[in-house]
Image (cartoon, coloured by chain):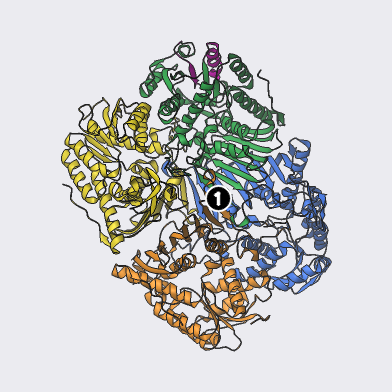
Chain colours: A orange, B yellow, C blue, D green
Amino acid sequence: MNRTTPWRTGMVGAGYMAKLHSLSMNNLAGLSQDPRDRFELVRIVDSDLAAAEQEAGRWGWKAFGDDWRQVTRSADIDVVSVATPNDLHHEICLDAFRHGKHVLCEKPLATSARSALELARAAHASGRVHRVNFTYRSWPAIAQAKALISQGAIGAVRHFEGHFFQDHNNDPTIPLHWRFRQGPAGAGALGDVGAHIIDLARFLVGEVDSVVATTQRFIDQRPLPHDRQRQGAVEVDDLACALVQFRSGASGTLKASWALPGYKNDVYFVVVGEHGAIRFSWERSNELQVFDSADAAPLSGYRTIPLGRAHPGAELFWFPALGGEQDVGVTAQGMGYGDAFVLGFRDFSQALRQGESPAPNFVDGLRCSEITDAILTSARERCWIDVDHAPVA
Amino acid sequence: MNRTTPWRTGMVGAGYMAKLHSLSMNNLAGLSQDPRDRFELVRIVDSDLAAAEQEAGRWGWKAFGDDWRQVTRSADIDVVSVATPNDLHHEICLDAFRHGKHVLCEKPLATSARSALELARAAHASGRVHRVNFTYRSWPAIAQAKALISQGAIGAVRHFEGHFFQDHNNDPTIPLHWRFRQGPAGAGALGDVGAHIIDLARFLVGEVDSVVATTQRFIDQRPLPHDRQRQGAVEVDDLACALVQFRSGASGTLKASWALPGYKNDVYFVVVGEHGAIRFSWERSNELQVFDSADAAPLSGYRTIPLGRAHPGAELFWFPALGGEQDVGVTAQGMGYGDAFVLGFRDFSQALRQGESPAPNFVDGLRCSEITDAILTSARERCWIDVDHAPVA
Amino acid sequence: MNRTTPWRTGMVGAGYMAKLHSLSMNNLAGLSQDPRDRFELVRIVDSDLAAAEQEAGRWGWKAFGDDWRQVTRSADIDVVSVATPNDLHHEICLDAFRHGKHVLCEKPLATSARSALELARAAHASGRVHRVNFTYRSWPAIAQAKALISQGAIGAVRHFEGHFFQDHNNDPTIPLHWRFRQGPAGAGALGDVGAHIIDLARFLVGEVDSVVATTQRFIDQRPLPHDRQRQGAVEVDDLACALVQFRSGASGTLKASWALPGYKNDVYFVVVGEHGAIRFSWERSNELQVFDSADAAPLSGYRTIPLGRAHPGAELFWFPALGGEQDVGVTAQGMGYGDAFVLGFRDFSQALRQGESPAPNFVDGLRCSEITDAILTSARERCWIDVDHAPVA
Amino acid sequence: MNRTTPWRTGMVGAGYMAKLHSLSMNNLAGLSQDPRDRFELVRIVDSDLAAAEQEAGRWGWKAFGDDWRQVTRSADIDVVSVATPNDLHHEICLDAFRHGKHVLCEKPLATSARSALELARAAHASGRVHRVNFTYRSWPAIAQAKALISQGAIGAVRHFEGHFFQDHNNDPTIPLHWRFRQGPAGAGALGDVGAHIIDLARFLVGEVDSVVATTQRFIDQRPLPHDRQRQGAVEVDDLACALVQFRSGASGTLKASWALPGYKNDVYFVVVGEHGAIRFSWERSNELQVFDSADAAPLSGYRTIPLGRAHPGAELFWFPALGGEQDVGVTAQGMGYGDAFVLGFRDFSQALRQGESPAPNFVDGLRCSEITDAILTSARERCWIDVDHAPVA
């Protein structure tokens, strides 16, 4: 599948994520050393036609429309990017595979493990490239963490502590949009931001075998979006906390909330192993912290490592090489959220070239949904729940 | 019980804690503005007579011995300080109450909730003053956190995250001393350091109703203390993780370990409420972090507050008043671990004067043991366990 | 000058900065709410034609060439972006003004105050819009710092501490490229990175009246770029330290280095006023620290404020509004170095629309050069030097 | 001078420092493994007899009085501790040496270099042990920093940045006590807290050859101590900033203030060498930060090292050894300001035993005064000033 023409891309959804997908595809073309890393912005669709038109104008999509079939079924499109409310992923992705498209789907893949299983099986059967947009995996600090763990830098993992905490939804005047309703969202904070920390736990430590969890809802009523004088019932969790057992024997906790004051955008984890530990917080996304038990006692402490071109993925950006013999270039200029998406599309482009679907693919999306479902079940039933690992093929 | 003669004190145990108790009682006499805050170091005993003699010489104990009854039954002693292996607390404390002594006992109060209940009932029945040495409650940053929560500064608590993590026991050449054996210790990391974070959870958030937990042991064998060529079996936990439900409705996690690389002495908690949050780590014990949702958006962020004479207890130390109208004096000179014990003895001295046993008393020691037992049971039985709250009187 | 056609732009220099300028102009078109914020990438030139061709291909420049006059004199170009070695700015900018172009010039504006004065006068006389690319002024944290100071949040400034420290040039195998030679660079670390901290000092505190300084060179010889077996002499400073007197009466220090181990990309300042202080480090570019003496003593401490849409310029990016009544949206997703340039071009676009040249313009570039020259003179002559403030018009 | 009887000590001054000296001498007796580390608290004197009586009662001084000659001339005293207003050091120390006493004098040694020179010569001529109480040198983090530098861990020092900043005197209602008057104090912030950072600069980097400086006064008038309705003139500096040249060729800045908002007790330094750097702030006194350029690029960053028994001096305290083969014990329990003084007295005790006067002795006090005088002169005369290094013997 070695080709030099760009990947002709259609996007379904002109909401928040359209900005980040569009910007990333455009930037990748300039930033990548590889001329094959190119996406052509062919068509963007949204049930809100005006939104589609606006994003098209901003980012250079050649066409726009209001029917997602104009993307999934169009002959001039190779790749479909799906960024709709969660419950629409199912129908759109299935249609895209049916029409021979490669698919990048936003997270969470589905609103239930059952739906996710169907999608993963369809993805597998299609022979097409599939990816769930768990962008954090590609972030240089996190990719570096993974590399260190794989190299044995901290030994076998003993404990994982992870959360994704925000506080923006603690404002009760935010209206009852789709993320607060069970049908379109599937889960609340757990589905929205928790999906990321669940995925990182699997990425860094491996499969989760069982969970026990609680959930809480802090704000029960919100104004209706189209009639703010009236209130409607919130149907999803504001906080989920799980104690988890990894297959490897490690223990862990996974937590997600969008309404805990003081946390702004804290994708946080610490992975503690037999002889070292690695710590990261998105609130200081441009640094990684690493502890090595082998350091001499008077020098024993966490290193705070600013990101630079020595870290996987950063070489794509503005950290200049300087021509020295062991040159690592300038470091710590800083990367942002948009750059995380560029890296996700870079990885997707490589996958497309190779015609393979490395992680995070639809099977990873499925595993995340299985854990999500297990957490919600455990919170309802107040007991440990074994996580399904349904076979895909 | 208003008196000016010092509290005649006997100490049982000349191990590690003897240093901190002795130093604290001596320093309190100088630091306190109140001349009644005085302890007289009458007698120290230890089954290892040489150890008792050495501590006596260092700190000015007037006498030493090798039989704890020389302390619990001696007519020239008012107050007994107990700092022995955990399983000896039971017999010694009972004997001390029986002979009319006031008792300060090191944590954990007992090796089981059953033993702790008997002790708490005896303490209550004795009419004497009783205290469990949960020193962290008196620390200015933590006392300030408590005050803020009590004043409603963060609203109702939603979530508590707490751990006490160290890594020093990750060295497998440390011999199999009593803390690694079930009998004398009761529990491992959970009993030794976990007791503190359990106590702080109760102090800051209130009673715990139920728990679900896991425990892990990382090092199964250790050299025998008196024959290091041979190994013996470790019988206790190296890591305990619990998901907890507070009576108030708040959720939380409590974790304890003495073998997680990278954590040195991390008594850590974050208390998140409806409209604010408070964060603390002993690894930066001289600061407190406070978040207030009411701050204007452009200035919204955690405050990092260095400890000074504005914080409860700090006025005892070296933060000078300077004579200004709203004077808070010099701040941030720093307090240390020894100073935490001074504050514990200051609070104990006040309790003795008033003839009352405010928290942390033997009932708090019991509640901690009940939670500890529930965590261990939950880890064995793999289910949620309701925590006992046995009536004391 | 209200217009909707994009600003037809030519770029001189296809080195490191071409990437950032090109990416920023492209991204601005998508990110800005204002359809007039558009630059058309007409032509890029470089004496290295292959480099120009490569950048053109990457970023969508419609044409490329090897003669800068193809940009400064071309009828299809409105705006010239200059990113060449420092000593070439002079001739190119003069030619651009002479041919009626608006000019954005990289920092430092010139290799001497004398040259800078000529440029500033030409810019002023031309009636065209001129800007020196001091990108940090537009960064949300720094713009917020400026706003706070202007509002009186910290009172009159007493002291300013600023540095721009890196360590990448501490590698002696980096060849003797133009930045290490007096002719093309003008100054070393002081000109390259020091220009930014000098500009920020002026931005935040005001004019500098006098300086006293030292400079040091740590690496005297470097391999010749085209014959690395031979060494040539480094001609510029690796570290400059200045004590400065501001016109307002405040004191300060300004330091710049590219070879101080441990500093990666540390644009650092603290501005201390009568009743507050503001602190920033680019190594944690996504946060701002603010201290307010008015806080009650028990809560007195620096706030660490994560950047979000409440801060000037951030609204351009991916911090979503959520529709609440006092909505500030999601915060702390993080912005990167590239985004700083987007903001610079946004400000430049506004200036172009208004036909005015707000700071940082060529006069600011001149003032920076005057301070640079004074620092170098002071270091040579070992005395206080009054800074020139040559009249421009 | 090997002896087992304690050093019979007299103290002149029952103000703020009496607490710290008394507490330290008492604690040292218990904490030190060496039974010779004992001071006997024989007599404390102060012109305010009531203050002397009160401190005597608190700390166990056997006698008290109101005439310093009762200390300097008493046959039952071996060692004199001087903690009076700065201008009294001169007469008291001279008298003490004249009567054969060993002397520990608080910093700054004198109110002028001329006075300090006379004291240093008298100290040297006396043959007695002399020490200036620059307590920070003994602090484990700083002693570790010194050890690392001495071992070549960072190579030759290139730059030193140091300050001692506080803000407590920014309160204009603090009365005009002796520290605000030229006569008794000699200098303001520069003498009071600046003395410490000057001493640390010499300790870590070596002799200072020349300085250029500015000083500022922020609060010109303060209430008279005994008639607060009336104001008197402050005579000293609130902020001093110096650019310094070390003999070694390194550059540096030294700053001192007691009225810069946001700084609480910030004894701060960074020492940057050829291939590493060391950073410390008293506001996080229980950690040291170390950077090593030799670390591999993906792991390159400052280590944050919590203090523990691996660091010089900490072994005296409560960091327990645990009996492992390479045992470093528990770390990070934290030490406080009082403990710094214990370490100072431990070092003094060793000096007394050896009959020698290692740094920081009266010659170090003199060098500090010479630098202080040079800074004040430079600020007045607006030029570089060479620092005197008057010969003592």
Does any portion of residue A264 appear in the rendered image? no
Does any portion of residue A276 appear in the rendered image? yes
- In the drawing, does residue B366 fall left or right of residue A337? left
Q: Is residue D105 above or below residue C249?
A: above
D87 within the magenta span: yes
Q: Which region of the structure is painted magenta?
A: D75-100
Please tell me which residue is depicted at 55% across the width and 41% down the height of the picture: D280
Query: What x and y, as percent, mark residue D221?
Result: 54, 29
C173 within the magenta span: no
Q: Nearer the viewer, residue D88 or B56?
A: B56
Query: What x and y, as percent, mark residue B10?
Result: 27, 31
Please tell me which residue is depicted at 68% across the width and 30% down the height of the picture: D378
Q: Amino acid at mark 1?
A: Leu
Q: Which quadrant holds residue A158?
A: bottom left
- In the drawing, does residue A126 fall left or right of residue C386? left
Query: What x and y, as percent, mark residue C114?
Result: 81, 48
Q: Which residue is mark 1?
A: C148
Chain letter belonging to callout 1: C
Q: Nearer the viewer, residue C205 or D58?
A: D58
Q: Is residue D380 above or below residue D66?
A: below
Q: Is residue A338 above or below residue C193?
A: below
Tag 1 secondary structure: helix
Task: For the N terminus of chain B, give its image quadrant.
Answer: top left
Dot 1, how many residues are within 10 Å of its Cα: few (below 14), some (14-19), or many (20+)? some
